């Protein structure tokens, strides 16, 4: 017998998955361990049983509930074109996330998306020169990266039961190497049961909030 109504148990499962996702995002769980514990969440027959799934993690350390570095990368039209930030993180769990308009892109950006719909638009962003590393960890998610024409995107990401589709060029015209001052995106990390798309849009085109308005052709 369950110790809570079905609706309460369902809400408790969602909360437990979000809690596990936070542990994974803070590197307290491996992908394999996350998958194993999520499987236990769906098999749990009571709220009491759900609590045992993270009992050891709570004793070790509490998951972070806020990432101050994310605030540094929020949209800010006053940032100078040469603004240079080394590290940043975007975290989206069981939600929808949009980063569009003018915002400062760090040299190393970690993107964690779990059961989410995420879009990062670089067409009006302030970009540092040279290689910009975007390391993604997306699980059961949709992730779209929008770049302006002629921006090189090197795709070194791994796909596990996922689709990673890039419309951006990895090489310059005639295979010429990029200038040291030209931003180049290097996409690394892993997509698990996810859909990842890299699309190209001109800077003069309108910026939309939803993906349905993007020109993917």
Image (tube, helix red, strand yellow):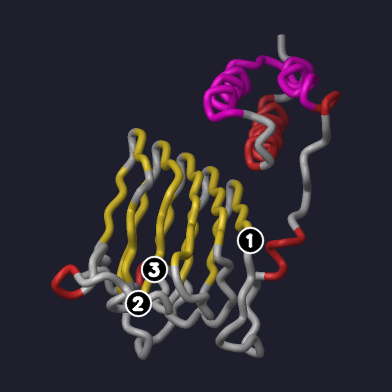
Does residue 184 lie above or below 165 as drawn? below
Residue 156 rendering spot, x and y as whole percentages: 35, 48
* Residue nearest the viewer, comparing 108 with 207: 108
Q: Is residue 50 magenta?
A: yes
Q: Which of the marked residues, 1 or 3, is nearer the chain's N terminus?
A: 1
Q: Secondary structure at mark 3?
A: strand
How many neighbours does mark 2 have within 10 angstroms: few (below 14), some (14-19), or many (20 or more)? few
Residue, disc 2:
179
Residue drawn at x 33%, y 63% is: 153
**The N terminus lies in which quarter of the figure?**
top right
Residue segment shown in magenta: 30-57
Residue 23 rendering spot, x and y as whole percentages: 69, 35
Q: Quadrant of residue 208?
A: bottom left
Residue, disc 3:
184
- Res. 87 mark: 1
Q: Secondary structure at mark 1?
A: strand
- Res. 135 mark: none
């Amino acid at each position: 017998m369950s110790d809570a109504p079905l609706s309460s148990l369902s809400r408790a499962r969602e909360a437990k998955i979000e809690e596990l996702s936070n542990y994974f995002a803070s590197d307290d769980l491996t992908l394999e361990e996350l998958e194993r514990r999520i499987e236990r969440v769906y098999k749990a027959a009571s709220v009491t049983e759900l609590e045992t799934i993270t009992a050891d993690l709570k004793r070790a350390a509490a998951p972070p509930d806020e990432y101050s570095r994310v605030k540094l990368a929020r949209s800010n039209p006053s940032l100078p074109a040469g603004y240079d930030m080394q590290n940043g993180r975007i975290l989206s769990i069981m939600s929808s996330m949009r980063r569009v308009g003018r915002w400062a892109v760090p040299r190393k950006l970690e993107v964690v998306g779990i059961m989410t719909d995420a879009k990062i638009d670089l067409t009006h962003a302030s970009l540092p020169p040279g290689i910009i590393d975007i390391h993604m960890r997306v699980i059961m998610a949709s992730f779209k990266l929008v770049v302006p024409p002629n921006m090189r995107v090197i795709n070194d990401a791994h796909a596990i039961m996922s689709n990673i589709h890039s419309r951006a060029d990895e090489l310059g015209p005639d295979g010429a190497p990029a200038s040291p001052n030209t931003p180049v995106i290097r996409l690394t990390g892993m997509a698990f049961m996810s859909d990842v798309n890299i699309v190209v849009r001109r800077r003069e085109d309108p910026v939309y909030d939803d993906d349905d308005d993007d020109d993917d052709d």
